[in-house]
Image (cartoon, rainbow, N blue to C red):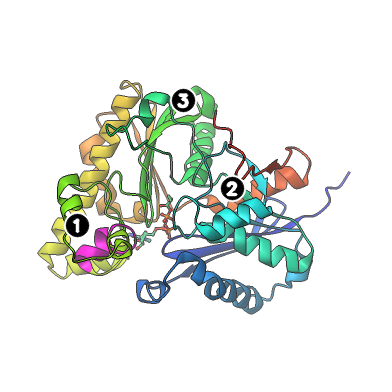
Amino acid sequence: MQEQGHRILVINPGSTSTKIGVFDNDISILEKTLRHDTDVINTFENIIDQYEFRKNAILETLDQEGFNISKLSAVCGRGGLLRPIEGGTYNVNDAMLSDLREGFAGQHASNLGGILAYEIATALNIPSYIVDPVVVDEMEPIARVSGLSLVERVSIFHALNQKAVARRVAKQLGKKYEELNLIITHMGGGITVGAHKQGRVIDVNNGLHGEGPFSPERAGTVPVGELVSLCYSGQFYREEIMKKLVGQGGLVGYLGTNDAVKVEKMIENGDENAKLVYSAMAYQVAKEIGSASAVLNGKVDAIIITGGLAYGKGFVKEISDRISWIADVIVQPGEDELQALAEGALRVLRGEETEKTYPGKVAATVQ
Ligand SMILES: Nc1ncnc2c1ncn2[C@@H]1O[C@H](COP(=O)(O)OP(=O)(O)O)[C@@H](O)[C@H]1O
Ligand SMILES: CCCC(=O)OP(=O)(O)O
């Protein structure tokens, strides 16, 4: 019997871009990356304020590409900073919208994924979903202990792409994801390094709130005493400090851009400071990978390097030179998030998987 056709619009708002795709079942018929300049993004006070800007950009692009949105069967967005939940495909409900709008666990572009999906879908009377949001949390109890009893470590990372790439590489290796120990390094606007032990991400740096390597626009781990002094120096409001850490940290803070391609041009043109900062980012990524190898007791089947920055051959070489002694390094530039979103929605539309309901204030289950 011929399968009923499902046309799915998928939306992935990242910190530096909005990626969209249209899929007929699992076949991509359109993929577009709408890049947003830091200058434009910085004019918005909060992530939620970017809603109209990003929605218009999406609808204009679909129109320019000749897509009639009334033919869509569902819209699926990348999920944001919700309460910790297990992986899967969730329908967008009121509890989720409320947490996304409020930025329950913080501000990140992916908060817009569920909201954009819901608003576009509701106008068309079709369902909206999110898949494997950034708050997927599979950390082991030992990884949650921070060292400060008032603060617990939490899992905020590129769950969607890390899981999708892990499954793809496992297939290439002729194994199941659940049979492998992998270190997966996603390098986008934020950088996260996950220790995947037999299908579960047992430890990962919080890529948003100041842990791990610095990234194109985030500060990562910084010397904590100096940071406390800065907070109480009387020079900055809380929001200003937060912006310096997330949005205006990393490459943006040092070099004025979140675009690694521009940084590579600066280096080509002889900018020694750009060279130092870019190398320092590679150095910090390598350190984080070394740390993940200790989490996995050195039993690592492969190290996977992915995300936009993985297109930078020189940058990847700098990392690989420091860590290739740990395990084979597999480079998968870019990401598979659009495909992963489409497949997540499709599993539910086909009835292969039951959609999950976001519990909101009721304590979310973390396995
Ligand atoms: N060919 C390339 N070489 C080096 N860096 C690249 C290349 N293409 C994209 N990048 C960099 O990757 C980063 C964005 O990665 P991406 O995964 O698209 O981020 P996000 O999804 O978080 O917006 C930017 O710094 C961008 O300049
Ligand atoms: C919030 C963790 C995921 C992340 O950093 O995504 P971007 O790189 O798209 O900002």
Task: Tell me the mark number nearer the camera, choosing from 1 and 2.
Answer: 1
How far from the left and from the top, in percent, is residue 228? 20, 51
For the residue marked with disc 3, what is the amino acid? Leu
Can you identify the residue that label 3 sits on?
180
Instruction: Give the CA separation, mark 3 to mark 2.
Output: 20 Å
Q: Give the residue at x 57% y 36%.
A: 86
Q: Give the residue at x 38% y 51%.
A: 208
Q: Residues within 10 Å of mark 3 (few under 14, many from 20)?
A: many
Query: Can you tell which quarter of the image residue 338 is in?
Result: bottom right
Which mark identifies residue 340? 2
How far from the left and from the top, in percent, is residue 195? 39, 32
Q: What secondary structure prevails in the magenta region?
A: helix
Q: Going from the N terminus, do you reach mark 1 or mark 2 first?
A: 1
Q: Residues within 10 Å of mark 1 (few under 14, many from 20)?
A: few
Can you identify the residue that label 1 sits on?
232
Query: Compared to 196, does 117 lie above or below?
Result: below
Q: Are marks 1 and 3 in contact (CB under 8 Å)?
A: no
Q: Element under label 1?
A: loop
- In the picture, measured across the screen, residue 270 lies left or right of residue 9, that is left
Whether residue 174 appears in this view of the structure is no
Which portion, as a residue range, is magenta? 245-255
Q: Nearer the viewer, residue 57 or 356?
A: 356
For the residue marked with disc 2, what is the amino acid? Ala
Q: Going from the N terminus, do you reach mark 1 or mark 3 first?
A: 3
Quadrant holding the C terminus: top right
- Residue 116 forms part of the magenta stretch: no
For the residue marked with disc 1, what is the amino acid? Tyr
How far from the left and from the top, in percent, is residue 147? 27, 31
